[in-house]
Amino acid sequence: MSTVTAPSQPLFRQYLVLTKPRVTQLAVFCAIIGMFLASPGLPDLRLVVAGTIGIWLLAAAAFAVNCLIEQEIDARMLRTARRATARGTISNNQVILFSGVLGGLGMLVLYNLVNPLTMWLTFATFVGYAIVYTIFLKPRTPQNIVIGGLSGAMPPALGWATVANAVPAEAWILVLIIFIWTPPHFWALALYRNNDYAKSGLPMLPVTHGKQFTRLHILLYSLALFAATLLPFVVRMSGVFYLGCAVVLSGAFVYYAWRLYKAYSDELSRKLFRYSILYLALLFAALLVDHWLRLV
């Protein structure tokens, strides 16, 4: 286990960290955007509140399971060594109980207050991330984040199902955008955390294929992402406001990826990683604003 020492945190805070709150917030935000886009006007706020709570609970449960399964890996990485599971300050049984309670409550909320479709889709996302990705993909292939990215890309579809009790093609376009966004986002992190991942034993792309190969793939995925973000306008799901925002935001993403490809630095890799988080939030916010502008 880890030898990293850290100031003791309140127990509540230790449990909260296991839910990866920043990642959970971004996922739930994308789900909420899906809820609003699924309705021609304002969606039923009761469904929005219940769906948000249920999706958040199951996402938090999945991240807690991820921390439990990867506790030994986390203990070898500076970025994650302070997690309670890595330090052993919260036992495996406690994490299982914690995740079980969160997941069970989430499924009850979604089934009883939203609809069974959303519950089953969210549960499938839980299994895909916590089990398929964490256990089978992440430790075995450098394409782990590509193949397993579908689970992380599902929130817009979950949100759409919450309100519409269906998942039409428009929802899957949003899923596709996040699916393509995930590899360059995560590989930017893996580049400047390369030594950490090498110590962990995980076959991340910079470790197995080198930084130059990874930088090329980040650039290629950023170009594919640019194209994918145009699809909402192409299928008339969104209008000119979104198109302008998508071109500017995706253009900046490609610019960062190009600079990283031409001349690597850890600082530039950090900038791309941080921008990728802001990028996704602003892109989906632009979709929502465009949706409302077209209703006026």
Image (cartoon, rainbow, N blue to C red):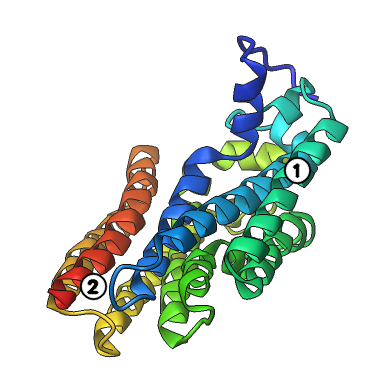
Q: Image height check: is 70 above or below 208?
A: above
Quadrant of the rendered structure where residue 222 is? bottom left
- What residue sits 74% from the left and 22% below the top? 87
Left of 154 or right of it: where is 246? left
Disc 2 residue crowd, few under 14, some 14–19, many 20+, Cα 10 Å: many
Which quadrant is the N terminus positioned in? Answer: top right
The type of residue carrying mark 2 is His
Front residue of 121/105: it is: 105
Identify the mark at residue 101; answer none if there is no mark: 1
* Residue 143 pos. (x, y %): 63, 66
* Residue 265 pos. (x, y %): 36, 42
- Distance CA(mark 1)–CA(mark 2): 36 Å
* Residue 102 pos. (x, y %): 70, 45
> Does residue 63 appear in this view?
yes
Identify the mark at residue 291; answer none if there is no mark: 2
Q: Image height check: is 136 above or below 78?
A: below
* Residue 223 pos. (x, y %): 33, 73
- What residue sits 27% from the left and 66% below the top? 288
Quadrant of the rendered structure where residue 234 is? bottom left
The type of residue carrying mark 1 is Val
Left of 43 or right of it: where is 28? right
Identify the mark at residue 15; answer none if there is no mark: none
Q: Secondary structure at mark 2?
A: helix
